Amino acid sequence: MQVSLESMEGLKRRVNITIASNILEEAVSSKLLNIAKTIRINGFRVGKAPLYLVVKRHEVSVRKEVLEELMKSNFLKSINRWKINPIGDTKYIPSEYKTGKDFSYSVEFEVYPEITLKGLDAIEIKKPIVKLKDLDIETMLDTLKKQQFIWKEITGPAGIENRVTIDIKSKINETKLKGSQSTDLVLVFGQNRMLDDFEKNIIGHNVGDTFDVTMTLPKVSQLQNFNKESIHFSVTLKKVEQKVFSEWNEALIKRFGIVSGSFVDLRSKIRKHMERELKNALKNYMKKQVINALLTTNEFPVPLALVNSEIDILRSQAENRYSSNKKHPIKLSRDLFEKKALRRVKVCFLLSEIVQKYQIKIDETLIINLIEEIAEDYEHPKKVIEYYYKNKELMNNIRNLALEQQAIEALFSNVRFIEKKMNFYELMQDSNEE
């Protein structure tokens, strides 16, 4: 067997292998003899059929099987000898096979990058100094309260903060459009359900008004045949409503899972939740800086197979999240996720190197703490904890999270911290940015 290894672009490699004809013929003959011992052919007892009949019936399929087996086994022997660890799919490229001749083929694949960590002693990050204040809690309570509103009908003119109910009829060049008439259409301004120019023409009108709106369709309109035409709407304003916010009361407080209906209990729950959010935000803020520093000082190629796999995952998640109609799911371009996928793969390699460098072992106590922190946000924490321990996939995710957290903390031993005063909401915004 003749073997050679080629380095191609990036992490791509190619192994070229030639199998001698005598090796192939011996393997084919051996397999045919074994078949002859057990095969049943009409007119002959089991294993007693003449060999030429066995060869006539099975030689083609046997040669194919032997070729596939030898291609795989010789490739594995070669990469084991060179101590190569392929990643992703391998691509077999056979040459033309001729009976009695040596057979050559190639195998293309990607390998793991060789990474030598650099710049670990020069990392400098900002350490937020944040204190959760009563004002932060009051702001959160006010935000939660404002989300619990009802719409109440009013008699005044429609304003930018209102919800309206309208009837509309539309036509282009005196021609009614298909589906051009809508009755009791409820429209909240600013939600992009209608064009901005259309909404602006409703503002200032009173209930009972019937008025015309004329506008030119944008180029992105679904009515592409009429892009240069003006569309005319006849609008009747039937109802104007405004948001009415409730003050804190027992019923409203219970909506947030506070059985007692006590504002003190609600405030206590919100404080605990914000304290957990603050703790996680601090970790994420510093983690992001450390990772950015590592990415800046450590350049290395990554396997395209892993990047493509990560793109598939991100794309699938996004399509499932934004597809409201299962019969007509949205399809997003892979290009949208390439940058994020590349970053994730690089970060994964870097953290793996850090784990090896510092010989980090998973801290089982940390795993317990992480699960308990997650469970705290649920009504029945014990059930959530039990569910996690019974779910292998969730436990693997937690273990990976724990290992990642330990790797980041190991880096902090060499990091130079610069304190930076921030408020709660500044930190929350900065820590969530990718």
Image (cartoon, rainbow, N blue to C red):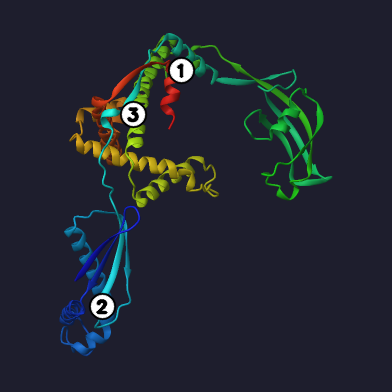
Q: Please state which of the two labelled residues, at mark 1 or mark 2, is closer to the viewer.
A: 2
Taking 32 as reference, is 286 above or below it? above
How far apart are labels 2 and 3 at the CA level? 56 Å
Question: Do residues under tags 1 and 3 come within 8 Å of each other at their CB atoms?
Answer: no
Q: Please state which of the two labelled residues, at mark 2 or mark 3, is closer to the viewer.
A: 3
Which residue matches tag 3? 287
Question: Do residues under tags 2 and 3 come within 8 Å of each other at their CB atoms?
Answer: no
- Residue 430: x and y in percent read 43, 25
Q: Label 2 sits on what residue type?
A: Arg
When asked about the image quadrant of residue 33, the answer is bottom left
Q: Label 1 sits on what residue type?
A: Lys
Q: Which of 227 and 114 lies nearest the eye of the viewer?
A: 114
Q: Secondary structure at mark 1?
A: helix
How far apart are labels 1 and 2 at the CA level? 75 Å
Q: Please state which of the two labelled residues, at mark 1 or mark 3, is closer to the viewer.
A: 3
Could you tell whether 320 is left or right of 404 in the image? right
Badge 2: few (under 14), some or many (20 or more) residues near its Cα, within 10 Å?
A: some
- Residue 356: x and y in percent read 20, 38
Q: Which of 44 and 27 lies nearest the eye of the viewer?
A: 27
Mark nearer the N terminus (1 vs 3): 1
- Residue 290: x and y in percent read 33, 30
Q: Which mark is residue 63?
A: 2
Q: Secondary structure at mark 3?
A: helix
Quadrant, the N terminus:
bottom left
Q: Label 3 sits on what residue type?
A: Lys
When asked about the image quadrant of residue 405, the answer is top left
Q: Which of 331 and 106 lies nearest the eye of the viewer?
A: 106
Quadrant, the C terminus:
top left
Q: Secondary structure at mark 2?
A: helix
Q: Which mark is residue 254?
A: 1
